[in-house]
Image (cartoon, rainbow, N blue to C red):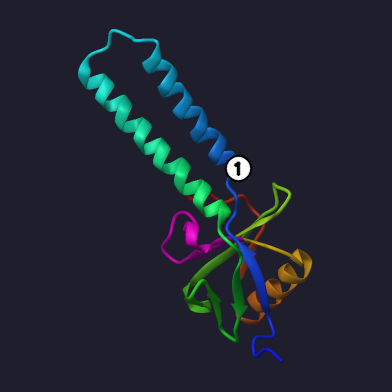
């Protein structure tokens, strides 16, 4: 039997909204360049730099969405995810965002203004059991659980 009584498979949130938004920005840059505007070289250089930044963000988002599920282990006073241990003392709040088909969980550490992307996940299966186990762990460790909308980076 497994030594981890609270072990769940989780995935990185797909970020479909981000992927569509970044794709839109890339298309706008391509269309603007194809129109052959009479702008200066400096403006074109900035546009190309922004396009490259958007393209890199798009590739990064697609890469993260395609990754295989990883294990999330709820230990006595810590969460082990993707080889990192996050202790209950480091967590300001666990945030749940239920605005999509697969709700997203974000673990916000003390001192952070947004949830780090490496601390965002969604359950790959058994969502209800996963939420119940996480809520029980948070209650045992005096960690606040919040259902408000939260922001994360790509």
The x, y position of residue 68, in whole percent, is 59, 62
In the displayed structure, 132 sits above or below 97; it is below
Residue 75, image x and y in percent? 60, 84
Q: Nearer the viewer, residue 49 or 93?
A: 49
Left or right? Give the position of 6 relative to 38: right
Residues drawn in magenta: 106-121
Q: Which residue is mark 1?
A: 16
Q: In front: 123, or 26?
A: 26
Which quarter shows the N terminus?
bottom right
Could you tell me if residue 102 is visible in this image?
yes
**Which secondary structure lies at badge 1?**
helix
Q: Nearer the viewer, residue 127 or 87?
A: 127
Q: Residue at x 46, y 44 (%)?
A: 59
Q: In this rendering, would 16 be left or right of 126?
A: left
In this view, the residue in front, 132 or 30, is 30
79 relative to 42 in the view: left or right? right
Q: Position of residue 138 (x, y in %)?
A: 64, 75
Left or right: residue 102 versus residue 111 is: right
Q: Residue 38 occupies which quadrant of the picture?
A: top left
Name the image quarter holding residue 6: bottom right
Residue at the extreme top of the image, as rendered: 38
Q: Residues within 10 Å of mark 1 (few under 14, many from 20)?
A: few
Residue at figure coordinates x 57%, y 52% from the top left: 65
Residue at 47%, 54% in the rendered image: 114
The image shows residue 45, relative to residue 8, as above or below, that is above
Q: Is residue 154 visible?
A: no
Q: Furthest-left residue in view?
A: 41
The number of numbered badges drawn on the structure is 1
Quadrant of res 49: top left
Q: Is residue 9 magenta?
A: no
**Image spot of residue 82 (x, y percent):** 51, 71
């Amino acid at each position: 039997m497994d030594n981890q009584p609270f072990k769940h498979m989780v995935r990185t949130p797909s970020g479909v909204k981000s992927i569509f938004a970044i794709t839109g920005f890339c298309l706008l840059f391509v269309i603007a360049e194809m129109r052959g505007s009479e702008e200066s070289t400096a403006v074109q250089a900035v546009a190309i730099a922004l396009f490259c930044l958007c393209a890199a963000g798009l590739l990064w988002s697609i890469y993260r969405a395609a990754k295989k599920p990883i294990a999330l282990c709820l230990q006595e006073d810590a969460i082990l995810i993707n080889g990192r241990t996050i202790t209950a003392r480091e967590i300001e709040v666990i945030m749940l965002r239920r605005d999509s088909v697969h709700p997203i969980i974000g673990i916000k550490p003390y001192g952070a203004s947004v949830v780090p992307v490496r601390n965002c996940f969604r359950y790959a299966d058994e969502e209800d059991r996963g939420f119940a186990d996480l809520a029980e762990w948070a209650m045992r460790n005096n960690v606040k659980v919040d259902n408000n909308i939260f922001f994360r980076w790509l």
